Image (spheres, rainbow, N blue to C red):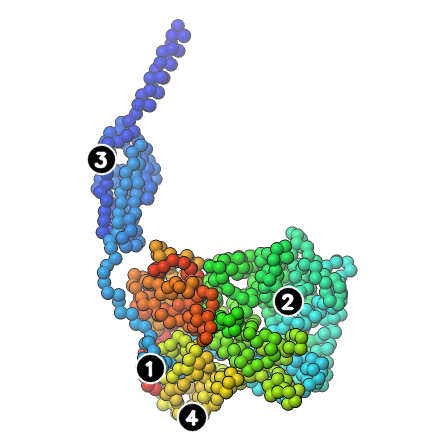
């Protein structure tokens, strides 16, 4: 009997299983009608359909949209639906014109789609865009100078000579003095050169890498800790160095009169013997430890020596009226141009991985900070910041990697910027748009990576004149350096809040750099026979590089507003009491007539106007000269020579009243290194913008593209199409004055944006007609003015 009951139960269970397997989960076919000509970024809801053809509760899901069953709330969650229940679908339309979005609904084993297509872009005329007046057809340029309008950037509104007017030299450097082996036993033509130059032209000292290297080569190894400098020997040598500084011989005691010129020095290490690869010190015959472990990461011994040097060779308590050696440097660069020597020119197993160099930076910084919280540490002091090389692979392999590994541990980024005006039969200039793109990229990526930018130290800049290497001093060599230095300085002065210090690579005599009897390149001092010919004398005289310092000798004061109709004419101005300094520099390869609008002066009268024009001699030497003109009234126009600089010094009868303000703020977008494709719209945001009532704005688009590609994208700001200028700072990077330019374009395109098209949170887009290259970064400069800026209306007031 038990067996019969069990048999009946099994039959019943089998029957139940058979019933479930026959359940109908295939609904009768249903569809949702597609929608077209829909508004952008809006919800669209289908009509309801009644689901039939299923037996009981059946699974339902959706992708790309939301569902509502029997008028319930819309949801993206999967659930169940029963026969004769109603179903609706909701879908968010695209944010672009004529784009289709689709949602797919699945009930049981049946799927169907609901599609929505946005409307076509309205065919309307682009709005009238207020942009700066184009240069007149006669080729002249107009410059506005608003003498009463204070220009502030990041809280800074004054000209800082200690930051900008510097020389690549140190205070007790032998080169300042004469009649010794460091000066080839020859006299200086200028008595007390160090004071005459530094005080006479109001110049500050900048950077040295020599002393720290010389002392490492002499210091003893710690017998108890091989690979590390002896701390006791560091103490002895440091005390000797401080005693020597405190007791300079009579002919060098003018050093003490110039100590205020060296309060924010930069000291840096070189590759050898600082990089731990077994290089022996020249005097001691030992090498820094090459260990790279958890307890002793790469660079520990190097950092230990540097920390000892900073602690024992300098006065640790400044401003206490007790001289105890030279003032401690304010900035320390972990290594000077490391990757060129360690990576670029090496191959195979000898080549050092950039990541190891950047970990070395972290270790050295940590060692320094164990004893020195008052020294700012930075790097990686890149020699050639070619971010765009190999379609930005160089940026990814080096500069981005440095920021990723060590950026947050650095107090500043250090960088070198050089024009190459005579390189491999080409003219490769950085001045102009390339410098702007390079600095914007560093700021933008840092901001995106760890929420803040890092300040910059430009510890070398100018021109490297390759075609003149090995030929000694020539006037044109100096002229190339002066042109680059003036142009880049004008650009650095636009970022006073982001730049800690800039140093043109101008050295004093640099006998340490003499090579096979050929003297070093960019020297402030040359011997008289180098200029005037054999037999004229061995005295040390100024080279043409002194004209840079002579030109800028008096500039000081509060920055006021200036602007030119031509972006290739750089302008700036400063007011100091009853004096004003108007600076105009040309990035053009041809001369320009410049019209001047002097604004905001009320009834102030003129005592005297002095125009100093640093230009090139037309005698065939291509040397540099300052031509000076004196006037009794404000000039309405001037002629600016090609690649020349003019500083107009104006003395008024009364102090100039600065009673209006122009405050500049930069906002970076969320865009980073976007690939350019003709089929893709590049969309990005710039949020939290404070839009002023009066003022102006400029969108800065950094592009890296081959020369045969378009540099004029279609730009939209909050749906409004703006005109992109065809001109940008400096040359087009394809063709120089007489030779070809860079291998490709990398620079900033600056687009004026009328304030009425901006809002707090901004949606922007770029589209290109061709493929290739990248948009590296985008930033928005906003200028908030207390007065209406009526740009380029002729006249003087």
Label 4 crowding class (10 Å Cα cut-off): few <14, some 14-19, many 20+? few
Asked if disc 3 and disc 2 are in contact, CB closer than 8 Å, the reply is no
Q: Residue under circle 2? A: 269
694 or 750: which is nearer to us? 750
Indicate which disc, 2 or 4, sits on the residue closer to the N terminus.
Answer: 2
Determine whether label 2 and label 4 are within 8 Å by CB.
no
Upstream in the sequence, badge 3 or badge 4?
A: 3
Numbered disc in front, either 1 or 3: 1
Residue at the spot x=34%, y=55% of the render?
679
Gap between marks 2 and 1 measured at Cα:
53 Å
Inter-mark Cα distance, 3 to 2: 79 Å
User: In the image, which is nearer the foreground, mark 3 or mark 2?
Assistant: 2
Q: Residue at x 26, y 49 (%)?
A: 117
- Residue named by callout 3: 50
Q: Which mark is residue 631?
A: 4
| Lower sequence index among marks 3 and 2 | 3
Residue 305 in the image: above or below residue 598: above
Q: Is residue 765 left or right of residue 203?
A: left
Secondary structure state at the residue bearing disc 2: loop
Which badge, 2 or 1, is on the more N-terminal residue? 1
Above or below, 47 relative to 201: above
Query: Relative to 227, does residue 30 appear above or below in the rendering?
Result: above
């Amino acid at each position: 009997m038990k067996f019969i009951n069990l048999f009946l139960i099994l039959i019943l269970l089998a029957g139940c299983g058979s019933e479930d397997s026959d359940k109908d989960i295939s609904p009768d076919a249903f569809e949702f009608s597609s929608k077209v000509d829909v508004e952008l970024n809006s919800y669209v809801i289908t009509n309801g359909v009644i689901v039939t053809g299923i037996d009981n509760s059946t699974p339902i899901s959706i992708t790309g949209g939301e569902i509502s069953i029997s008028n319930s709330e819309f949801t993206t969650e999967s659930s169940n639906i029963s026969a004769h229940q109603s179903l609706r679908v909701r879908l968010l339309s695209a944010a672009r014109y004529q784009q289709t979005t689709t949602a797919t609904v699945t009930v049981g084993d049946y799927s169907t789609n609901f599609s929505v297509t946005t409307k076509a872009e309205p065919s309307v005329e682009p709005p009238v865009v207020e942009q700066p007046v184009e240069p007149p057809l006669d080729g002249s340029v107009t410059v506005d100078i608003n003498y009463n309008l204070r220009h502030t950037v990041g809280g800074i509104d004054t000209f800082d000579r200690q930051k900008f007017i510097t020389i690549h030299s140190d205070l007790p450097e032998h080169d300042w003095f004469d009649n010794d082996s460091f000066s080839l036993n020859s006299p200086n033509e200028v008595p007390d050169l160090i004071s005459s130059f530094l005080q006479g032209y109001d110049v500050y000292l900048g950077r040295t890498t020599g002393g720290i290297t010389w002392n490492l080569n002499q210091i003893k190894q710690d017998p108890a800790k091989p690979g590390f400098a002896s701390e006791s020997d560091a103490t002895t040598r440091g005390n000797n160095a401080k005693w020597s500084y405190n007791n300079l011989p009579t002919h060098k005691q003018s050093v003490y009169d110039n100590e205020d010129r060296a309060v924010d020095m930069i000291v840096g290490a070189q590759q050898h013997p600082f990089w731990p690869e077994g290089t022996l010190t020249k005097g001691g015959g030992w090498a820094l430890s090459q260990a790279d472990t958890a307890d002793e990461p790469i660079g520990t011994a190097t950092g230990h020596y540097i920390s000892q040097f900073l602690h024992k060779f300098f006065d640790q308590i400044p401003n206490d009226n007790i001289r105890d050696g030279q003032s401690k440097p304010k900035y320390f660069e972990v290594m000077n141009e490391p990757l060129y020597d360690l990576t670029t020119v090496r191959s195979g197993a000898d080549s050092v991985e950039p990541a190891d160099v950047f970990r070395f930076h972290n270790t050295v910084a940590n060692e320094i900070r164990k004893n020195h919280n008052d020294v700012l540490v930075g790097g990686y002091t890149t020699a050639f910041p070619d971010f765009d090389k190999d379609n930005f692979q160089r940026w990814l392999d080096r500069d981005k990697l440095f920021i990723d590994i060590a950026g947050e541990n650095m107090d500043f980024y250090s960088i070198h910027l050089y024009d190459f005006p005579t390189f491999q039969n080409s003219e490769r200039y950085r001045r102009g748009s390339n410098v702007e793109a390079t600095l914007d990229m560093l700021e933008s990526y840092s901001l995106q990576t760890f929420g803040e930018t890092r300040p910059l130290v430009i510890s070398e800049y100018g021109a490297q004149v390759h075609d003149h290497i090995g030929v000694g001093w020539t006037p044109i060599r100096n002229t190339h350096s002066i042109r680059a230095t003036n142009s880049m300085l004008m650009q650095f002065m636009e970022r006073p809040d982001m730049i800690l210090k800039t140093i043109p690579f101008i050295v004093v005599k640099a006998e340490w750099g003499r090579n096979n009897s050929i003297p070093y390149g960019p020297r402030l001092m040359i011997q008289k026979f180098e200029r005037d010919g054999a037999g004229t004398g061995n005295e040390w005289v100024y080279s043409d590089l002194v004209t840079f310092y002579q030109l800028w000798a008096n500039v000081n004061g509060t920055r006021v507003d200036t602007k030119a109709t031509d972006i290739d004419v750089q302008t700036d101005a400063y007011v100091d009491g009853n004096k004003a300094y108007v600076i105009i520099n040309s990035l053009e390869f041809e001369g320009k007539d410049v019209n001047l609008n002097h604004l905001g002066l009320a009834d102030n009268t003129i005592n005297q106007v002095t125009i100093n024009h640093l230009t090139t001699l037309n005698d065939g030497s291509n040397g540099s000269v300052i031509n000076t003109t004196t006037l009794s009234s404000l000039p309405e126009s001037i002629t600016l020579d090609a690649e020349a600089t003019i500083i107009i010094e104006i003395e008024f009868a009364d102090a100039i009243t600065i009673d209006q303000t122009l405050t500049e703020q930069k906002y970076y977008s969320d865009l980073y290194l976007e690939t350019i494709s003709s089929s893709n719209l590049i969309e990005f945001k710039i949020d939290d913008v404070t839009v002023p009532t009066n003022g102006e704005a400029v969108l800065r688009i950094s592009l890296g593209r081959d020369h045969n590609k378009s540099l004029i994208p279609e730009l939209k700001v909050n749906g409004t199409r703006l005109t992109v200028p065809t001109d940008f700072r400096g040359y087009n990077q394809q063709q120089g004055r007489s030779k070809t330019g860079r291998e490709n374009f990398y620079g900033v395109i600056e687009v004026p944006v009328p304030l009425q098209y901006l809002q707090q949170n901004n949606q922007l887009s770029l589209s290109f007609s061709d493929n290739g290259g990248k948009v590296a970064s985008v930033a928005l400069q906003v200028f908030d003015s207390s007065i209406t800026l009526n740009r380029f209306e002729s006249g003087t007031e």
